[in-house]
Amino acid sequence: MTPEVLSDNPVLAVALAALTPGVEPRYALLVGLGLGLGLLESLALSAAGVLVLGLLLYTAIDTVDRLMEALCSRKHLGVNPGCIYLALRSSAARRAGGYVERYGWAGLIVFIAIPLPATGMYSGALAAALLGIRGPRLLASLLLGGYLSLAITAVVGGGVAVLST
């Protein structure tokens, strides 16, 4: 997909950005603002992205974990994506571990909500897989953390958007 297609269709750009690791819904909001969508429209699209991404990660993380562990055990591969995934999962668990150790599964919400690099919904799901947070607590952590992160970004990004007009 070319940049022109995305700039001509900001709704599609926000939707794709919301599902992209590293961007996620919190920064998809800023993509929408940057492409000329209003704050409420960008916020609504990004909020839908939290729901879609949260449900996707919740339903897929155990399966992805098992597949990547099996893939990593195959030694004949050169650069092994399974082993890279497991290293990323361990790194995410180390970063989130202090929050979870201190606050329980609510610490995962805090970890996901902090709008900084290497935190967020993808990292939170990876950390949860290794820290043993599953079921309703995982889904609640992903959704609440995602929406809190989006709210923080909306206050900062929305304030900048209002001040710059």
Image: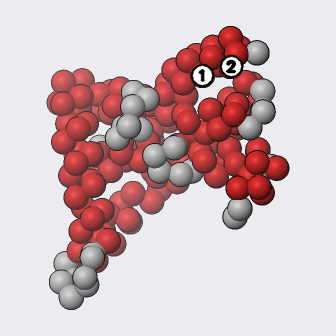
* Colour treatment of the image: secondary structure
* 119 vs 99, nearest the viewer: 119
Badge 2 crowding class, 10 Å Cα cut-off, few under 14, some 14 to 19, many 20 or more, is some
Task: Name the element at disc 2.
Answer: helix
Classify residue 43 by image quadrant.
Answer: top right
Any mark on residue 157, and which? 1
Horizontal relation, residue 151 to residue 139: left or right: right
* Image quadrant where one finds the N terminus: bottom right
Residue under the image location 80 percent in, 49 percent down: 9
Find out whether the residues at labels 1 and 2 contact each other: C-beta distance under 8 Å.
yes
Residue 94 percent across, percent down from the top left? 18, 42
Residue type at mark 1 is: Gly
Helix, strand or loop at label 1? It is: helix
Q: Nearer the viewer, residue 160 or 126?
A: 160
Find the residue positioned furthest to the right: 8
Residue 109 is at least partly visible in this image: no
Three-letter code for the amino acid on which mark 2 is drawn: Ala
Q: Is residue 89 left or right of residue 48?
A: left
Percent x, y of residue 90: 21, 52
**In the image, residue 151 lies at what x, y percent?**
55, 22
Evaluate whether residue 143 shows in this view.
Answer: yes
Is 73 displayed left or right of 47 in the figure?
left
Q: Nearer the viewer, residue 117 or 112?
A: 117
At x 63%, y 17%, the residue is 160
At 68% from the left edge and 19% from the top edge, which residue is drawn? 161
* Residue 92 in which image quadrant: top left
Q: Residues within 10 Å of mark 1 (few under 14, many from 20)?
A: some
Q: Toward which corner of the image does residue 165 lie, by quadrant?
A: top right
- Tell me, for residue 161, which label it has, or none: 2
| Callout count | 2
